[in-house]
Amino acid sequence: MSEVIEKGALFELELELPNDKIAAATKRLVGFEVRYQRLHRDLRLLADPQELTEWCKEFHHKELPICAVVMERYPLVIFAGDVGTGKTATAEGACDRLARVRKKEAMLFKLSTRVRGSGKVGEMSTLLNEAFEVVAKQAGKTRQAFLIIDEADSLASTREMVQSHHEDKVAVNTIIQKVDDLRRHNGRILVFLCTNRGAALDPAIVRRAARTEEFNRPNDHEREELFRMDLEGLGVKDQIVHELVRLTGARDGQPGFTFSDLRSKLLPDALCRAFPSRALTGEDLLQAANDVRPSPMVKNGL
């Protein structure tokens, strides 16, 4: 283990799955169920290719070339889109849901940005190797391991960038090599790359992704769902909710609010207008919606 980073600090998060806290957070994640229903069959095939073999035997009574092609995919998924749109939370929720559906022991790892190290030659690739070795060891021969790499563009940016440092290029090569090695684990390791700057990812990594999911800012329906969920019990009138939806959409040359903007900025701002001397009102919410500004757009999608 490198002396630069303490043992156990390779990961921001290490959890056994299923996890009740993740499940509870998932219930509050607007749009998760719709997205997961769209993804879950593909994720199951990536996490357990043997299921495809059994399906093929049951319904076609022989091995088919299409099944062999699908089973050769890399167990790598890219979640790309604007900041604050729920990419990492969705990845965590999907891992937890898969563990519940498959009723199999599983571990969730979230890679720490500290694996970038201190800039010493070879340090970042060494730390990345160590991290993947830990995940592989946990997966063993029977368990499932999920690895989430947040802010993936900081580790896997295209090697063609003129300003790309030699160490960054080596790190990308290491990630590509590790992704190539994943297939020998027969789905027991599934990796999620989450990024705000999909276009910055190295093309070789993008090509290896079995699935790429785009995340956009919430639409009117999703913002209304969030407001009704988070404002439950306050007796906020429908007309106030509808006005909040309008005010938080794209307007006056500004983009719409992200989920993070709503829950980390707008709602706390409204509450602070009333706390600690009086009850929260619809007017507080409207004033916050007028005063708080949405996060700037990240113009670098896939």
Image (cartoon, grey):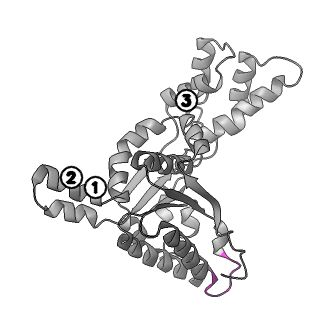
Quarter-wise, where is residue 164 in the image? bottom right
What label sits on residue 55 in the rendered view? 2
Distance Cα–Cα, label 3 vs label 1: 37 Å
Q: Earlier in the sequence, mark 3 or mark 1?
A: 1
Q: Secondary structure at mark 1?
A: helix
Quarter of the picture holding the N terminus? bottom right
How far across and how far down the image is residue 216, in percent? 49, 43
Q: Magenta segment range?
A: 117-123
What label sits on residue 23 in the rendered view? none
**Extreme residue in the bottom direction:** 121
Q: Main secondary structure of the magenta part?
A: loop
Distance Cα–Cα, label 3 vs label 2: 39 Å
Q: Secondary structure at mark 2?
A: helix
The residue that appears at 63% across and 41% down in the rendered structure is: 260
Q: Using the image, determine if residue 138 lies above or below residue 60.
A: below
Quarter-wise, where is residue 247 in the image? top right
Distance Cα–Cα, label 1 vs label 2: 6 Å
The residue that appears at 70% across and 27% down in the rendered structure is: 290
Residue behind mark 3: 223
In this view, the residue in front, 149 or 26, is 26
